[in-house]
Image: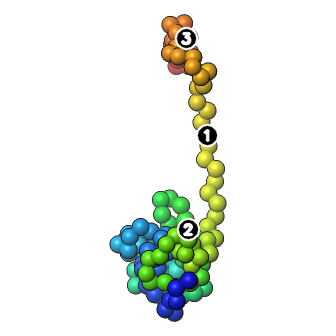
Amino acid sequence: MPAGPPSTRVDRWLWAVRLLKTRADAAQACRGGHVRVNDRPAKPATSVAVGDEVRLRIGGATRIVDVGHVIEKRVGAPIAVRCYVDRSPTPPPEAVVPAAARPRGAGRPTKRDRRRLDRFRTERG
């Protein structure tokens, strides 16, 4: 693990540990109120140090990570994962909508099948 400074900017750290793609995205997330450090809203220049909790809301999901190592340069994914402890809640399972299944290789529906489907659709309303 590369030696790092005692603290760094939160936008730089989020980019370096690959939680966001670019540093500009990290700064924009901070300005938009999607990043909290130790349960306080974070600006891009907010300092993070080892032991801090960072909450990041991206794509409708919340990531909660504890800073384990402070780095300023972007590193490879295997090293980046070792720089934080992920305590994010597991997302709820998505509801699966059953799809109409036809036997494999059955081909196109026949005229009889289409009439049944039309009748079914008109009965439902």
Pointer 2: what residue? 63
Identify which amino acid the numbered label 1 is placed on. Val
Q: Residue at x 58, y 30 (%)?
A: 99
Q: Are marks 2 and 3 in contact (CB under 8 Å)?
A: no
Residue beneath disc 1 = 96
**Amino acid at dot 2:** Arg
Regarding residue 93, the answer to whether it shows in the image is yes
In-front residue for pair 12/119:
12
Spatial separation of the CA atoms under disc 3 and disc 1: 25 Å
Locate the N terminus by quadrant. bottom right
Q: Are marks 3 and 1 in contact (CB under 8 Å)?
A: no
Judged from the image, the secondary structure of the residue bearing numbered disc 1 is loop
Name the residue: 61% across, 67% down. 88
User: Residue 4: x, y in percent?
Assistant: 50, 89
| Along the line of sight, the residue nearer the viewer: 122 or 96 | 96
**Rendering quarter of residue 116:** top right
Q: Which residue is mark 3?
A: 113
Q: CA distance from mark 2 to mark 3?
A: 48 Å
Which class describes the residues within 10 Å of circle 1: few (<14), some (14-19), or many (20+)?
A: few
Within 10 Å of the Cα at label 2, are there few (<14), some (14-19), or many (20+) other Cα atoms?
A: some
**Sequence order check, earlier mark of 1 and 2:** 2
Residue 23 picture location, percent across and down = 38, 74
Q: Secondary structure at mark 3?
A: helix
The Cα atoms of the two marked residues, 1 and 2, are separated by: 24 Å
